Structure formats: C-alpha cells, structure tokens
Image: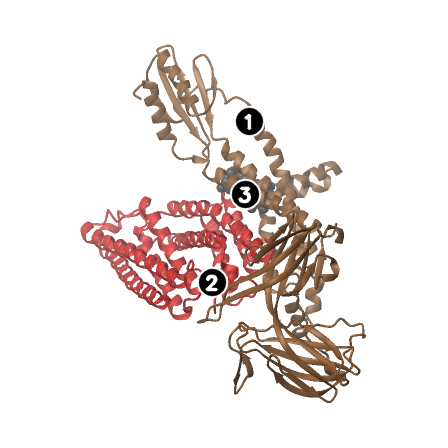
Amino acid sequence: MSKEVNIPELGATASLRYLWNQLTSMRTALILLMMLGVAAIPGSLIPQRGQNPMAVRDFFEKHSTIAPWIDRLFGFDVYGSPWFSAIYILLFISLIGCVLPRSIEHYKTMRALPPLTPKNLSRLEEHRKFAGSKKSFDRASKWFEKNRFRVRVEKSSISAEKGYLRETGNLFFHLALILVLLGVSFGALFGMKGEAIVNVGERFINVPTTYDSLTFGKLVNEKILPNFTISVDKFDAKYDPLTNAPKDYTAFVTVDSNGIKEKRVIKVNSPLTFGSTRVYLQANGYSPIVTVRDSTGKVAFQGPVPFLPQDGNLRSIGAIKVPDADPQIGFVASFLPTFSRTPNQGGISVFPEALSPKLLFSAWLGDLGLDSGIPQSVYRIDTSKMKRVALSSLTPGESYKFPEGEITFEGLTPWVNLQVVSDPGKDFALVGAIVAVLGLLASLFGRRRRIWVRIDEDKKIEVAGLAKNGAPGLAAEIAKLTEYIKGEK
Amino acid sequence: MQTTWAYISNYFVYSAMGVFTLSFFAHAYETAWAVKAPATTASTKGNLLTKTLDYKRTEKAARIATAMMILGFLLLFAGVISRGISAQHVPWGNMYEFSITGALAFTGAYLAALRKNDLRWLGLFISLAVLLTLGTAITLLYRNSAPLVPALKSTWLVIHVTAAIISGGVFLLANVIAATYLYLEYSERTGGRKVWAKRLPDLETLDQLSYRLVAFVFPLWTFAVIAGAIWAESAWGRYWGWDPKETWAFITWVAYAAYLHARVTIGWKGRRAAWLCLFAGSTFLFNYVYVNVWGTGKHTYSGL
Ligand code: HEM
C-alpha cells in the first residue's frame, strides 16, 4: 500500500513496470478472481438474452422504467458485457504474467542439480547418524536411483530431490486455464448455431434459408455450413403412462452428405456429427395437417402446420394463415393430442400422445398483416384488423364449412426441432479442462522433498531431509532409506 | 412392482431417520456427560473422549452413537438403492432423490473421516443436519418415483451427479467445521470456552481440517463441473451456457479457488479463512436450494 504513494515520482517505464508488477501480483489475481465470481451473479438473477429472450421481453414489459437502465449497463447480456470481459481478460493477463516466468524458472530448476549438501545436517528434519561403510554409503545412491530421485553425487555426500511434479502440476493447471479460455473464445468467434423445425416426412437442407434462427461467430459466415440434408422419416416418443413424463425420444432420419445416403438415429443425448458440426434433437411437437378451400372450393392451403407445445401433455397453440384466399383467412387454433374437457378449463389434453386428437379453432377474415413489414410470429395472428366468422372443433377426417370457405383436418404429423451447432473451439477447452484437473491433482497431492546422505572420515553415515510445504511422510521415507543403507532389507 | 420398491425405499428412509434420531440422542448424552464431570474440565485440551474421568460410561455412549450412525448410513443406503430400483434409474431425478442421496454422501464423508481422525464431537451436528435434510426431503420435497426425462438419460449424469453430491457432502462438512472454528474462536476471545466445548479440538486442528477437506474435494468439484459440461454438450448442444445452475457452480468454483489461494499463497488462516470457507460453502447451498426451487433454466429437474 505504502508503495502507491511513490507513483508520481517514477518515470514512464518505471510506472509501467510498477503497474505490471501490481497486475501480476497474487493479491491482484485474487481480487480479480473474486470479482469474476461476483460479476457472474447478476446474470443468474436477471433474465439473459442469450439464454431466454422471451423472459427478457416480459421483463421489459413488467418493469418498463428500470429495464432500459439495466440494458444500458448490459444487465441482459452480462456474460458478453464489456465489464465482465474486462475482468476476465485482466485476470488472464495477470495469470500469464504470473505463470510464464514461474514456468521458466521451474524448468531451469528441474534441469539443475539438487543443491549441495548443507554443512550442518543435524539441524534439519529427521536427522540420523549411525556407523556404516563406503559400501553402505554406495547403497544410498542405489536406493535413490531405485526410487527415482534426482541426485547429485559428490565424493562423500549425496543430495537427492523428488516431487517436482507438485510445481509442474500447479503450472500446468494455470496454463490449462488459459487454454480453456482460448477454446471458449475460439468457439465464439468461429462457430455457428441455428435451429429449424422439421415435420416428419420433410427434409432439412443445410442452407441459411431453411433455418428458423441462425447466428454465426464474429469471424465466419454462411460459407462454413457443411453440405448435408436430413430427411426425418419417423419420430418415436415414449411416455410413462403413470406420470405422463417423457421416457424416450428417437428421430429416425436419412442423411445425405456429399452424395452418400445413410439411415441414422438422433436421440436427446446422441447427436449426429459432421466434422465439428453436430445436429441435436432439441424439442418436438405436433403439426396438424389441414386443407383450406376458399368459397369457390379451390384449395388455398394444404399441408402440416407446426404448433407450439404449452404444457407437459402437449396442448399446443398455432396459427393457420391462408394469405392466398380473398379475403385472407386465418385460423387461431389449439391442438389437443388427447382431448378432454373440464368445467373450468374447457378443452385440455390429458396425455402427450395423440390418442384422441382434436383441433379447436376460430376462423378470421380480413388482413393477416403479412405485408406490414413487422416480423410476425408463425404461431400467432394479429386479429386486430380481422373479423371472426366461425368457432368450432374438428377430429381427424372432419371438415367444417363456413360461408367464405372450408377447413379439413386431415390428420397430424409430429415435428422435431433440430439444433445445428458448430463449435471448433470445444476440443481445446476439453483438453484444457482435463489437463487442469490432472495438474490440480499433482499440485495438491504432490510432495516435494530433499534428502541428503553424508559419510565422514570415521565411516559414520548421516541422513537428513527437508519437506517443502510440510509435506507428510518424510519420516517414513527416511526410515526406509536408513534401513536399506544398513542392509537390513 | 415399481410402487412396491418405492414403498420399501420409504420404509428404509423412515427407519434411517429413527436410527439417526437415536444417534443424535446418544451424541447429546455423551456431550452432556462431559459437562457433568467437572474434574475433567481443567485438564481438557483437544479431544478428550479418552481423558474424561468417567471414561467407560462416556465411551459406551460414544460407541452407541457411532454405531447408530453406521446403521443409519446402511439403512439410508438401502433406501437410496431401492428408490433407484423403483424408478429404474440412478435415484437423482428430482429434489427428493437428490436430498436423500446427498444426506447419504454427507454421512459417508463423516464416517470416512472418522476412521482416521477423532471426530466424534462432530457427530451431534452431523446427525442433526442429516435429520433435518431427511425430514425436509420426506415432508416437503417428496415426489412419486418416476422415470427420467430423456435429457437425464446419460452415463455422464451418473458421473456428474456422483461427483457433485460427494463434493457437496464434503463442502458441507468443511463448513460445519469452519463454523465450529468461528464459534470457538469467538468464545475463546470472550472469556474462554464453554464447559461442554472444552472437549472439542483446538483451533489449529479445526483450521487445518477444514482446509484439508477443501483441498481434497476441490479437484473433484472441478471434475464434476467438467463432467456436467460434457453432458450438457451432448444433451443441449453447448457445453457452457451460463444457465443459473452453471453460473452458480462456477461461482462456487471461483470462491473455493479464492479460498485455496488465500490460504496457500497469501497465508490466510484462522478467522478470515473460516469466513471465506463459509462464504464459498454457502454459494453451493444457494445453488442447491435457490436454483432448484425458484430458478429457471434447463437444470430445473426438481420436480416441484
Ligand atoms: C482463474 C483463476 C485462477 C484459479 C482458478 C487458480 C487456482 C489455483 C489453485 C486451485 C491453486 C492450488 C493451491 C494449492 O496449491 O493448494 C493455485 C495455486 C497458485 N496460483 Fe492460482 N489460480 C488462478 C489464477 C491465478 C493467477 C492469476 C495467479 C498469478 C498471479 C495465480 C498464482 C498461483 C500461484 C503462485 C499458486 C501457487 C500456490 C502454491 O504455493 O502451491 N493463480 N491456483
């Protein structure tokens, strides 16, 4: 602390050096480490855009006065915010500044010989003195060799050292943390992530237009999308009849990658892999298949429409938009895979499988607002400029006729949400993490110690040792060595 | 079949609670007895189980207390296993299952530490903590046994959760010891230990013990976080997403790393280190309770 008073009198290089020394000091590192922990907290309490954009939108609606302020402080993007980045970048500079010099120093010590035998061994730990011979003295170096100590043999003394692994492990741990950070940044800069809903029976082509959402790392673009298509042939969902909880999801697909066609299976915990790109099964739901005819009987729309699940029993909501009819027709609908009715909730679903499916809808005429330029949710219809003309429900195969048209509920097909992710940095992060754990183990359980043996003119042998950081077990080790020298074993 | 095993599991858990209650009373009796022997208090330093005057009677109570602890552990073990059989997966699908397995790990950590260290004085707190955990679990958190949702079906779940639960048990143990340290340190500063506390170890020992425990589990916790990341990568397509649970696991990791640094490289000891240890441990508890119960995000499998 008192040093800081001196800063103004130092020259520019000296101040820089002073700053550098401060930054790479253990105390600064510790403070930065704590700050990183504290800085991570708000992101777990305030909704984050990266994790849950819907919750952020709700938050803006509920707390309209403070939300913009939180936003200005990057409160909804904590983990990408300048202040969060600043802390960890400083921490890692500090880490590098601290660990690199230590690594070099440690490398030198490892190559150097262990230190000469001190004059007065009796002041060290575990000192012993007993009668011996030149021969028994030689046995000592054999013991060290057998136990893989590094030794320095002089005429009448031996210095031996072991346990460099402790410091090596510690350095590897810290260096590995840097590797983890590099892996994370690499993935963020060169990766991509996208999602697409695909009806069973349809095909996903890996080009930007097939995605419902798609983002790229800062340094790449759509050229990195590998060339493949995935046809979803079948989707199996198994549910527990007692609790309705899902037990297993399996998507059966045909993959076409560079002209090679293959049948494959995607499950929740086993994605498909194309190089560093992986395809995950993320969510699923139902698409009712409908046909809509206009007042002349001409087909204005036909096909499956993905609906969005709302609860564990897959009650789903959706919108069927028919812009080609004149006037435009829209259906605001909900789909119930296993229909039931309760007095206070109305229609509900009581099981996630489609055991007795039903489509409830209201039909609207007017302007769907598709040309307004405002992005529209595919699951909702803005009915403010429309007029309701019908309200009804259908089971598969049934049709409903109203003056301006007719809707037929043909059947249904499941849809799956495929998540496509490329993270070229993740292997570095994994290697870094593994090295970090190994290094940590070595550094926490390694024992560094030195042992010296000397023989004097009277053929008396002296043994003594020194354990760094109070590492346990030195006494036992020296007892073994003594026994060995005396030839008892 | 499934329900039968669930019933069996409940019986085991109830019996374990009964036995832990007995263990608690035995520990309490043993502790109280030491107070009743005034002749011993003057010469008491460190752990004095063996030095109390009425050696035999206290020793007997202590043995009963530990035996009950072991029996409780075995019963709870059976309870956890049969719960697993009933649900046909490792019994970590919801908060109830996490809690009983966590209590098992906590007791196991204590019994394992007891083999090498004379920690019987801790038994009173341990049995109480286990009773509270099991009591909350069975009254507030109980859920019927159910199969795992697909995302939880992975070998990495077993590895990740095993490592996390063991770490949690040891972190809690370290916390109990750090809290004891703070209490004793406070009473020593303000007029000396209470009579009953004289049989507890000296401050130095407690200080070292909580450090050793943390140094021992920190790598395991690091591994638990990594295993979680590997699992998340295969289930959700990203190994790290700052989900609340992940964020708090990270905070706990940082807090314990700071603790180790403060001790090893700056040389913090005693009171300051104990507070830091308590702080780090409470981030773990916070993650367990807050994020499971009230949190949002992908990790909320509490079943509440
Ligand atoms: C992400 C940040 C960091 C983490 C998680 C971390 C973690 C650790 C851990 C767990 C230990 C082992 C303690 C032991 O031996 O018992 C350690 C030791 C050490 N760390 Fe860090 N560290 C971090 C950053 C830093 C930085 C920035 C520096 C340097 C400025 C540093 C310097 C040291 C040193 C010198 C030791 C040696 C302790 C000994 O004497 O054995 N660490 N670190």
Residue B99 visible to the viewer? yes
Query: Which sits in the foreground, A3 or A403?
Result: A403
Q: Residue at x 53, y 73 (%)?
A: A313
Chain A is which colour?
Answer: brown
Image spot of residue A293 (x, y percent): 73, 81
- In the picture, measured across the screen, residue A302 lies left or right of residue A349, that is right
Residue that mark 1 sits on? A109
Residue that mark 3 sits on? A434
Task: Please give the letter of the chain rendered in red.
Answer: B
**Tag 3: amino acid:** Ile
- In the picture, measured across the screen, residue B104 lies left or right of residue B34, that is right
Query: Which sits in the foreground, B271 or B152?
Result: B152
Mark 3 chain = A
Mark 3, Cα crowd under 10 Å, few <14 / some 14-19 / many 20+, is some
Q: Is mark 1 within 8 Å of ligand 1?
A: no
Image spot of residue B295 (x, y percent): 54, 66
Residue B195 visible to the viewer? no
Q: Residue at x 72, y 63 (%)?
A: A72
Q: Quadrant of residue A94?
A: top right
Mark 1, Cα crowd under 10 Å, few <14 / some 14-19 / many 20+, is few
Report if the CB atoms under discs 2 and 1 are less than 8 Å apart: no
**Tag 1: amino acid:** Thr
Judged by depth in the image, the label closer to the viewer, 2 or 1, is 2
Residue that mark 2 sits on? B148
Mark 2 chain = B
Mark sitting earlier along the chain (3/1): 1
